[in-house]
């Protein structure tokens, strides 16, 4: 018979009513066959009505009453009220023909009588009679009932006869008497003085089963009042030594181990004494060593004893324990090695749990300290959440240096890849990432590569906030990498590997994809594995793979940076822009497509921006660019009404970052496009005239060497006419970055302004305390710059007539 068949047979009606009457069988058959709860309710209530009539008849035999009471128990287990049968149960305890029938009566009473029930008083006389009976079966039935019943008057009337049962010649009566006395103490702690001598005497009982019963009782008492019973420790050691010397009946052998549960109780009692600094730790250590040698090479129950021994040793003083182990030939903790190397998950769990209690790594085996053995356990139990939680707790103890983390990182990442359950992936990845965070101050190429690859294999199980924070941290690390380009090069190569191996079904976090696009857009030229044109090919491929519009825009921005930097592009790029982006309903996708098409149409212009980005264009070149922009934007399809990307982003892109251009409420009501700046002839002439005059002033300034051409009033007037604004916050560089601008009479703010002027090539209009006004000619427009220096931060506000000019400036200087 298979296990499933055997399990099913236990639920059959025949098994449930084995040995009972035919009527009981029919009742159980009907109940188990009920289709609905209502049908079951009708059947049970009808049966209870019939039972109440049958039990009330004057000539009911004890055998029939026994059947009725068993049926009442079954109805009670189904959740129905059977209080009408309590009086008959009490009568059965008094008038049952046999002890077995009286036991059924006691069983019903213990199940249904509560502390406040009025009928409980009727049972006390019966209990007194059975406790004084010469039939030990009656004694046992009464003692069992006392352990489960709780009535206010029980202690006054039943304590003395219960104490006298400890004088019985039957060991089973004395054993049950020990439990009954303990429950009297639990209900009324003031009775401890009366029951204590008998409980102590039970530890010296001639029958070992009574002693073992007393061990459990004393363990519960010692948890509360161990200081009062220091004198009992030698007796517990003596009982344990008796077991180790095999002075116990062979009937207590379980799977080759003699009285394992009694040994476990003794060890737990030692632990209670040890936590209160009672007894000699050396004596307990020697005793534990004897216990371990007795269960060595044994299985099943022996594992529990070994586990308790490890708990006891872990509670000892670490210095004393180290000295005791040094004086001993063998380290007792080495017995855990077979547990840690076993293929059985349960044994692994026991070994790991014992190690978590042993926090002193000096006492560990050398093979455990490097973490490899624990990592192998994780690999073999990769989807067992319980074992993995214990393994990570052990790794918290042994992984204390970056070198140890480096040694296990490959196996840890392999475990994350092999795991199929989200909860195990999350547990392993969070632990590993948190360990990586401890060493981010010692930044190196291994750290940045491992962090990127770990985030990639988490399969989008990390919380969005956690992923966003980690990506932002790595981005800031790359921006701060001013001394050399090793970190940036490593990041680029890692991202290339990630995108090359990624398929359409991979589930990467959108934040990681966005960070990958940004990294390749900024630093693709540093790659040691792929050329920039190859990286652009990968970017274009993954732009089409991602479904999120904002990620597609981020990808195109990365491609644009690569095109500007390398002065070349793939032939398929133009087709992608015109087919999938230029006519999109999303304004940002159309905007980036138009910018890139303009860029691809005039590569010489890109080259000029690359080589001399700060030389302003003359009026003719401005007119030429304006005509080109109008030509591209004259397409009827591009002039279709734009949908608000803010609404779309709120629905489909909850993780999108802040847009680079912020609009006021009036600007949101009146939607704009790049061509809207030049639609009205009057506005165009005014704006072009203003731009041309300001650019002429800058050219003259560069030729004549004057300090400032634009006045503060002119700056203010042009500032108010610019509708498009971008704000950002920068962290001021350290003094090592602008040491060449030091002059003895200058303060830090002046030096930082000079440093920014050298970086951005702008013209300063005026400086007032912490603020600086400046402008820069870029393409066919001007960018006005307002700097507020609140060190260590620099608050930058940019304004321009054209959003594309602002965008170009922010991309050129990574704002």
Image (cartoon, rainbow, N blue to C red):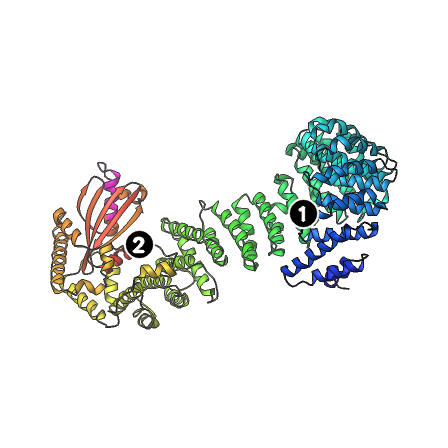
Q: Nearer the viewer, residue 462 or 738?
A: 462
Q: Is residue 84 left or right of residue 551?
A: right
Which residue has dot 1 on it? Answer: 350
The answer to which quarter of the image holds residue 106 is: top right
Report x, y in % for residue 299. Answer: 76, 49
**Mark 2 surroundings within 10 Å by alpha-carbon count, few (fewer than 14), some (14 through 19), many (20 or more):** few
Count the marks: how many? Answer: 2
Residue 657 is one of the magenta-drawn residues: no
* Magenta stretch: dominant secondary structure: helix
Residue 493 sits in which quadrant? bottom left
Q: Which callout, 1 or 2, points to the residue nearer the camera?
A: 1
Look at the image and say whether residue 749 sits in the magenta stretch: yes
Task: Check residue 226 in the rendering and tell me which mark sits there, or answer none.
Answer: none
Q: In the visual, does 730 lie left or right of 29?
A: left
Mark 1 vs mark 2, CA separation in Å: 55 Å
10 Å neighbourhood of mark 1: few (<14), some, or many (≥20)? Answer: some
Sequence-wise first label, 1 or 2: 1
Q: Nearer the viewer, residue 597 or 685?
A: 685
- Residue placed furthest toward the front: 58
Q: Nearer the viewer, residue 667 or 794?
A: 667
Of helix, strand and loop, which one carries label 1? Answer: helix
- Lateral position of residue 25 relative to residue 274, left or right: right
Counting from the top left corner in percent of width and height, residue 360 is at: 62, 38
Residue drawn where x is 25% and y is 64% of the image: 606
Residue 305 at least partly seen: yes
Magenta residues?
742-756
The residue beneath circle 2 is: 814
Q: Nearer the viewer, residue 93 or 485?
A: 93
**Image spot of residue 574 (x, y percent):** 31, 71
Q: Is residue 337 above or below residue 623?
A: above
Secondary structure of the residue carrying tag 2 is: loop
Residue 214: in sight, yes or no? Answer: no
């Amino acid at each position: 018979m298979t296990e499933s068949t055997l399990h099913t047979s236990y639920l059959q009606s025949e098994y449930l009513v084995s040995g009972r009457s035919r009527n009981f069988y029919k009742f159980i058959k009907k109940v188990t066959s009920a289709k609905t709860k209502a049908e079951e309710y009708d059947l049970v209530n009808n049966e209870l009505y019939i039972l109440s009539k049958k039990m009330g008849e004057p000539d009911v035999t004890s055998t029939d009453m026994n059947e009725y009471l068993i049926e009442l128990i079954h109805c009670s287990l189904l959740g129905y009220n059977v209080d009408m049968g309590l009086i008959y149960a009490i009568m059965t305890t008094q008038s049952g023909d046999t002890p077995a029938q009286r036991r059924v009566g006691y069983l019903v009473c213990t199940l249904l009588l509560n502390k406040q029930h009025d009928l409980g008083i009727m049972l006390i006389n019966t209990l007194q009679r059975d406790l004084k009976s010469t039939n030990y079966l009656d004694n046992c039935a009464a003692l069992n009932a006392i352990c489960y019943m709780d009535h206010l008057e029980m202690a006054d009337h039943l304590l003395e006869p219960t104490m006298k049962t400890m004088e019985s010649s039957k060991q089973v009566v004395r054993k049950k008497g020990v439990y009954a006395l303990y429950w009297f103490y639990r209900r009324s702690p003031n009775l401890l003085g009366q029951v204590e001598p008998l409980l102590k005497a039970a530890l010296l009982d001639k029958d070992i089963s009574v002693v073992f019963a007393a061990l459990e009782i004393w363990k519960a008492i010692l948890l509360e009042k161990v200081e009062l019973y220091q004198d009992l420790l030698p007796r517990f050691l003596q009982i344990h030594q008796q077991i180790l010397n095999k002075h116990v009946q062979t009937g207590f052998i379980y799977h080759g181990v003699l009285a394992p549960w009694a040994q476990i109780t003794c060890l737990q009692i030692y632990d209670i004494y040890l936590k209160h600094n009672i007894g000699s730790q050396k004596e307990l250590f020697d005793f534990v060593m004897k216990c371990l040698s007795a269960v060595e090479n044994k299985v099943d129950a022996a594992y529990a004893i070994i586990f308790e021994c490890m708990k006891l040793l872990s509670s000892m003083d670490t210095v004393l324990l180290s000295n005791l182990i040094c004086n001993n030939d063998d380290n007792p903790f080495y017995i855990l090695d077979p547990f840690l190397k076993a293929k059985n998950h349960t044994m692994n769990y026991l070994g790991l749990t014992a190690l978590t209690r042993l926090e002193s790594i000096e006492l560990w085996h050398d093979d455990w300290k490097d973490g490899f053995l624990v990592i192998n356990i994780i690999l073999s139990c990769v989807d067992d959440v319980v074992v993995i939680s214990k393994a990570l707790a052990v790794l918290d103890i042994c992984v204390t240096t970056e070198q140890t983390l480096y040694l296990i990182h490959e196996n840890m990442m392999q475990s994350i890849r092999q795991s199929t359950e989200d909860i195990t992936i999350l547990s392993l990845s969070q632990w590993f990432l948190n360990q990586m965070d401890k060493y981010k101050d010692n930044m190196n190429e291994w750290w940045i590569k491992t962090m990127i690859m770990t985030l990639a294999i988490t399969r989008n199980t990390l919380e969005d906030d956690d992923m966003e924070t980690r990506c932002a941290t790595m981005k800031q690390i790359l921006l701060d990498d001013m001394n050399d380009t090793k970190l940036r090069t490593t990041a680029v190569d890692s991202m290339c590997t990630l995108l090359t191996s990624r398929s359409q079904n991979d589930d990467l976090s959108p934040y990681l994809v966005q960070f990958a696009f940004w990294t390749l857009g900024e630093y693709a030229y540093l790659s040691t594995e792929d050329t920039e044109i190859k990286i652009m090919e990968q970017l274009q491929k993954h732009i089409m793979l991602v479904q999120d519009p904002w990620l597609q825009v981020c990808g195109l921005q990365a491609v644009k940076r690569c095109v500007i930097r390398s002065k070349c592009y793939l032939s398929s790029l133009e087709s992608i822009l015109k087919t999938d982006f230029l006519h999109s309903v999303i304004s940002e996708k159309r905007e980036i497509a138009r910018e890139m098409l303009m860029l691809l149409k005039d590569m010489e212009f890109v080259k000029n921006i690359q080589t001399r980005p700060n030389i302003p264009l003359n009026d003719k070149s401005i007119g030429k660019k304006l005509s080109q922009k109008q030509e591209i934007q004259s397409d009827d399809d591009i002039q279709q009404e734009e949908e608000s990307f803010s609404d779309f982003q709120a629905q489909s892109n909850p993780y999108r970052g802040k847009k680079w251009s912020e609009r006021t409420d009036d600007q949101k009501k009146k939607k704009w496009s790049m061509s809207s700046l030049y639609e009205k002839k009057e506005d165009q002439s005014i704006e072009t005239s203003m731009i041309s005059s300001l650019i002429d002033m800058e050219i003259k300034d560069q030729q004549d060497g004057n300090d400032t051409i634009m006045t503060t009033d002119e700056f203010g007037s042009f500032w108010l006419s610019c509708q498009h604004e971008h704000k950002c916050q920068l962290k001021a560089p350290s003094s090592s970055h602008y040491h060449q601008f030091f002059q003895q009479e200058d303060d830090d703010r002046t030096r930082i302004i000079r440093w920014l002027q050298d970086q951005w090539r702008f013209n300063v209009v005026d400086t007032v305390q912490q603020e600086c006004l400046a402008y820069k000619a870029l393409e066919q427009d001007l960018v006005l710059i307002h700097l507020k220096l609140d060190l260590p931060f620099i608050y930058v506000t940019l304004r321009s007539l054209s959003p594309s000019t602002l965008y170009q400036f922010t991309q050129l200087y990574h704002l």
